[in-house]
Image (spheres, rainbow, N blue to C red):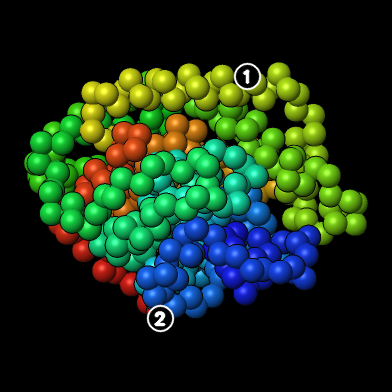
């Protein structure tokens, strides 16, 4: 993904504002670990400018499209990674996720994406969006993702947020299965309107986990939508990153991103501290909720993929609306819990749906074990778009 540094390549972050004439002499930690294990890097995948939104288009690279329907978006911000996987261009890609940017495109394109616990995969430089941003694997199968996790979770001293390396062999854990796991299933998180086809596919997927021996209880975690908290923290990052751009550079930005930066200039320190407090309360609430369950499951997204080139299905020009169609993803960036999207079927129009599996903090293994168990029991991950 064109947000991660690659030695010898220009990392332009989907933007015409980034100076291409730099040294480009370092790898990001995940890139370095993959190189050390012999990975062959094929290219950098597209991203919206600085990964700022849940779809993938930018003034630099244009519109990225969904291989399942070229009129539709692959989601974002790791939409180039997911489109490349769905189209069969590569078996493994890296994504970043600051509000759903691995899981949204995974859900829209029928591939697997895992947002690790914050700090599980070292990241450097620190994202301008701070501690909501994660790096993780995106693959055509869970089996490939766990092999990637074995590699990219290894230590790197450049990330002072990184968790102590615990040596977990994720691949060795995949035979465990889900028998006896306590799963909280929340179809709507208590407040989300979900497309009926998506709701049905997710319900059927949860039924499969029950048949495999998981103990499933339908229950909502009981928190209010944290969109305002997330927006304040995210906009603060956008302001810090781009608020000081000179006018000639700012004119090169995606106009909707420039509008976000302008609105973010009105944020106060009190706004920011209130958001930090709200985030802490959400994290505490979810820590207590997850003490009763091994996993929480929701849909990855409440809707199937919509038209490419739009910011959101209902309001293409409203910069405040993109979080409204991603309500299942960004709460778990705030709480920093591990979360994955695994393909769970197709709508009548042939668009993929995703099952969202959220774990206890630091328990990436159970998320991956459950994803793999579901994958073994189904064949959705084996489906390919026509023509690719």
Classify 360 as above or below 196: above
Q: Which mark is residue 387?
A: 2
* Residue 64 horizontal side relative to residue 289, left or right: right
Q: Residue furthest front?
A: 157
Q: Give me the disc on residue 274.
A: 1
Q: Where's the C terminus, which quadrant? A: bottom left
Residue 188 relative to residue 100: left or right:
left
Relative horizontal placement of residue 10, taking residue 71 as reference (left or right): right
Crowd tier of the residue under label 2, counting other residues whose Cα lies within 10 Å: few below 14, some 14–19, many 20 or above: few
Element carrying mark 2: loop
* Residue sticking out furthest to the right: 247
- Residue 342 point in image, percent of width and height: 31, 53
Quadrant assignment, res 361: top left
Crowd tier of the residue under label 1, counting other residues whose Cα lies within 10 Å: few below 14, some 14–19, many 20 or above: some
User: Can residue 306 be seen?
Assistant: no
Residue for point 59% across, 70% down: 7
User: Quadrant of the image for the N terminus?
Assistant: bottom right
Residue at the spot 48% in from the left edge and 75% down from the top edge: 41
Residue located at (40% from left, 20% from top):
285
Residue at the image point whose x is 67% and y is 68% from the top: 24
Can you tell which mark lies on residue 229? none
Instruction: Identify which residue, 280 or 263, lies in the foreground.
Output: 280
Image spot of residue 193 (x, y percent): 43, 35
Q: Is residue 171 visible?
A: yes
Expressed as whole percent of the image width and height from the top left, the position of residue 84 reads: 46, 71
Task: Tell me: residue 197, above or below residue 78.
Answer: above
Please state the horizontal and vertical placement of residue 62, each as a whole percent of the image.
67, 68
């Amino acid at each position: 993904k064109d947000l991660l540094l690659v030695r010898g390549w220009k990392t332009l972050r989907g933007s015409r504002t980034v100076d291409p004439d730099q040294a480009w002499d370092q790898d990001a930690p995940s890139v370095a670990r993959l190189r050390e294990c012999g990975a062959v890097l094929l290219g950098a995948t597209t991203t919206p400018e600085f990964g700022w939104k849940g779809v993938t288009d930018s003034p630099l690279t244009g519109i990225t499209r969904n291989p399942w329907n070229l009129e539709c978006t692959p989601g974002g911000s790791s939409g180039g990674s997911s489109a490349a996987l769905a189209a069969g261009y590569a078996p493994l890609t890296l994504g970043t996720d600051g509000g759903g940017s691995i899981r949204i495109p995974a859900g829209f394109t029928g591939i697997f994406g895992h947002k690790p616990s914050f700090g599980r995969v070292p990241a450097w430089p620190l994202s301008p969006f701070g501690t909501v941003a994660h790096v993780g694997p995106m693959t055509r199968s869970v089996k490939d993702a766990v092999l990637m996790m074995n590699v990219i979770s290894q230590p790197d001293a450049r990330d002072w947020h990184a968790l102590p390396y615990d040596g977990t062999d994720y691949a060795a854990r995949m035979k465990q299965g889900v028998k006896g796991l306590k799963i909280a299933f929340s179809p709507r998180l208590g407040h989300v309107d979900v497309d009926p086809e998506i709701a049905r596919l997710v319900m059927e997927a949860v039924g499969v986990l029950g048949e495999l021996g998981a103990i499933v209880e339908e229950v909502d975690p009981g928190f209010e939508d944290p969109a305002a908290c997330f927006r304040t923290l995210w906009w603060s990052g956008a302001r810090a990153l781009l608020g000081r751009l000179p006018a000639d550079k700012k004119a090169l930005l995606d106009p909707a991103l420039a509008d976000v930066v302008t609105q973010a200039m009105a944020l106060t320190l009190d706004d920011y501290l209130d958001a930090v407090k709200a985030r802490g309360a959400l994290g505490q609430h979810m820590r207590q909720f997850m003490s009763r369950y091994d996993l929480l499951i929701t849909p990855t997204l409440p809707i199937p993929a919509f038209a490419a080139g739009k910011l959101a299905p209902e309001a293409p020009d409203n910069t405040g609306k993109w979080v409204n169609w991603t309500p299942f993803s960004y709460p778990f960036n705030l709480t920093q819990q591990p979360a994955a999207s695994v393909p769970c079927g197709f709508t009548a129009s042939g668009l993929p749906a995703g099952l969202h599996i959220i774990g206890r903090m630091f328990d990436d293994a159970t998320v991956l074990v459950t994803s793999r168990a579901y994958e073994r029991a189904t064949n959705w991950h084996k489906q390919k778009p026509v023509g690719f």
